[in-house]
Amino acid sequence: MVQLSILQSHYHPKPDSLSISVIGFGAAGGGVEYDTVPIQKAINACSAAVSKYRRQCHVIFPPGKYLTATILLKSGVVLDIHRNATILGGPKLEDYPKEQSRWYVILAEDAVDVGIIGGGEINGQGLKFVQRLDEKKNVMVSWNRTGACLGDECRPRLVGFIRCRNIKVSDVRLIEPAYWWYVLFNFLPILG
């Protein structure tokens, strides 16, 4: 059963949009325990609602800090991160898929009508990947265990839209990436 609700947010979804809060699926928002499972459940429920009601659905992140491994964004789903909310990327290799090409905090693949909005932030906790601070170039942690990537390129990215269409990203801060901030690959129109 999908629980739908309308919540206050910095961004006001269209009147015919659906909204689901990550809190309703068990996210704590304390920044210490991982909220990956409740966040992904909320995204999956939103995706099911999109299929059933043929309307866009917003996953609401109320104020708090949401520590997560990779989350997969699906068609018709928009992450609505409140201005006092932060999504924190996990700092461990096991937080991410086995394939290095899929190392993102937030990843959408082959999705349509997706986005990230709301005034909040996505923080990759990049400083946790610095082995030694250096004035010219920091020495970074490398997760290169398989030879799939080169040296210090082996770290997770913040946000990736791979083969997606109709992408909207606005009013969100992307900070402290461990590697790249924002990746668009083989995409079609970006809105907003």
Image: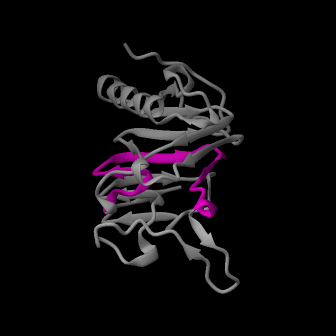
- Chosen colour scheme: one colour
Camera-side residue of 36 and 135: 135
Camera-side residue of 21 and 147: 147
User: What's the residue at 56%, 64% (across, down)?
Assistant: 129
Is residue 81 visible in the rendered image? The answer is no
Q: Is residue 87 magenta?
A: no
Q: Is 130 above or below relative to 75?
A: below
User: What's the residue at 58%, 47% (across, down)?
Assistant: 88
The image shows residue 160 at horizontal and vertical percentages of 41, 58
The image shows residue 106 at horizontal and vertical percentages of 45, 50
Image check: 64 left or right of 48?
Answer: right
The image shows residue 191 at horizontal and vertical percentages of 48, 55
In which image quadrant can residue 64 be found?
top right
Image check: 52 left or right of 14?
Answer: left
Q: Which residues are magenta?
A: 101-128
In the rendered image, the residue lying farthest to the bottom is 136
